[in-house]
Image (tube, grey):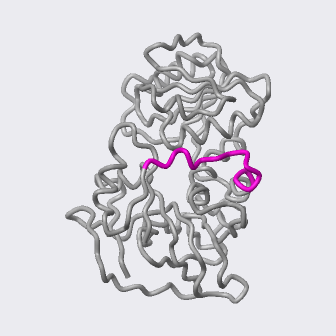
Amino acid sequence: MRALVLDTDGPRFVPDRPFEPRAGEATVDVRLAGVCATDLELVKGYMGFTGVLGHEWVGTVSSGPSAWLGARVVGDINAACGTCKTCLVGRPSHCPERTVLGIQGRDGAFAEHLSVPVRNLHRVPDGVPDEAAVFVEPLAAACQILEQVHVRPSDRVVVLGLGRLGQLCARVLALTGARVMGVSRSAPPLALLPLSVAGVRAAEATPDGRADIVVDCTGSSAGIAAAMQWLRPRGTLVLKTTTHDLGAASPTAWVIDEITVVGSRCGPFEPALRLLAAGLVDPTPLIHASRSLVDGVDALEQAGQSGVLKVVLRP
């Protein structure tokens, strides 16, 4: 099969990579896959991953249980063991034995075919196009905030960083009725925000220390430090991305102001699918380019350029 493979020399297109589905799993023919910031970090050496990249996808089941054959699906990226204590208490995304699609120990979706545990599959409603369904994984990550934090209509919420994930977080949070503001270093992402979200450039913003909740999607120490300027004492800081260095961000301030810090990662697919099916979130304006898998290396470079939100790949 055709695939975009990451090895020790970097990413490369492979026209004839062997494909063998894992025992007991479904084979999915990939229809569309999205390039994520995590993919770009993997190319830089994050996690030491080698293999087929890609964890945001929509496809059609071509092999597996009869009830799933022909179904258009998306899938959870964490393939858990299902038997450990963590799995048995309902936290498969934290299974210590898990593999992670296109990230850790398992080939991903930048290929023609994909092997996925059946329990990870979710059917895509007929009215949801592929171009929207490919966003289910990051949209689920945005929905995870609502699983972890009680957001009230009276709350003031600030989202720092309006890249791919920040845009989705702002949309999901606005559905709660809260007053949501998105902050971006540049102007173009502000134009993509829905009317329910206020937008401001970081250089023109005046943090006032009154926000109830701040969601950091910058993945930078500067972003985390800026979050504290927006947040009120005893407010909630949600970290949606990782950073290797806290830099100017001081945990001392978290203690003094009694800040609740919430790490937030993968989320539930079904709520994300319901939002798409109901038309409450439309992520398709975030697609910057649609590229062929043959051009995958160039697509990765394009996805890393400033101002580019989502690049999708077609096998």
Residue at (74% x, 27% y) in the render = 178
Residue at (41% x, 29% y) in the render = 221
From the image, which quarter does the C terminus lie in? bottom left
Q: Tell me if 95 is positioned left or right of 186 in this view.
A: right
How far from the left and from the top, in percent, is residue 312?
45, 58
User: For residue 311: magenta?
Assistant: no
- Quadrant in the rendering for residue 185: top left
From the image, which quarter does the N terminus lie in? bottom left
Residue nearer the viewer, 226 or 187: 187
How far from the left and from the top, in percent, is residue 114?
49, 76
Q: Tell me if 113 is positioned left or right of 303 in this view.
A: right
Q: Tell me if 297 is positioned left or right of 94 in this view.
A: left
- Quadrant in the rendering for residue 232: top right
How far from the left and from the top, in percent, is residue 289?
42, 52
Residue nearer the viewer, 211 or 248: 211
For the view shown, which residue lies furthest in the left direction?
9
Residue at (55% x, 45% y) in the render = 285
User: For residue 276: magenta?
Assistant: yes
53 versus 153 height, above or below: below
288 versus 249 height, above or below: below
Magenta residues?
274-288
